[in-house]
Image (spheres, rainbow, N blue to C red):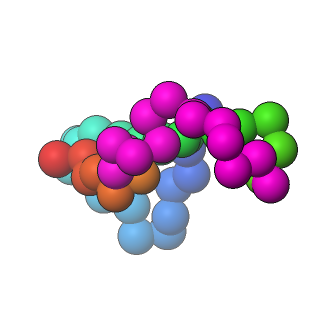
């Protein structure tokens, strides 16, 4: 993934930027009330990257 330098970019400073994402499991249709999607109640989308 290519980065972008801004006009005030200081090349003497270095660091790492991590972009994190999480996808929950889901059923085949949104109206299926009897389906159990694995991991849907583990609060994965509420977790934070530390």
Side of 15 where 45 appears, left or right: right
Instruction: Using the image as rendered, state which of residue 30 and residue 17 is in the foreground.
Output: 30
Q: Residue furthest top?
A: 38
Q: Is residue 33 above or below residue 36?
A: below
Residue at 34% over, 50% down:
43
Say whether residue 48 is visible.
yes
Instruction: Using the image as rendered, state which of residue 47 and residue 36 is in the foreground.
Output: 36
Q: Which residues are magenta?
A: 31-44
Q: Residue furthest left?
A: 50
Side of 50 where 30 appears, left or right: right
Q: Main secondary structure of the magenta part?
A: loop
Q: Would you say residue 34 sits in the magenta stretch?
A: yes
Q: Is residue 47 above or below residue 26?
A: below
Position in image of residue 25 (x %, y %): 58, 35
Q: Quadrant of the N terminus?
A: top right
Position in image of residue 6 (x %, y %): 50, 64
Position in image of residue 38 (x %, y %): 50, 29
Q: Would you say residue 22 sits in the magenta stretch?
A: no
């Amino acid at each position: 993934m290519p980065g972008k330098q801004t006009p005030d970019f200081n090349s003497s400073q270095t660091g790492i930027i991590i972009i994190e994402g999480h996808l929950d499991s889901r059923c085949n249709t949104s109206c299926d009330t009897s389906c159990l999607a694995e991991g849907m109640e583990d609060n994965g989308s509420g977790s934070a990257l530390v």
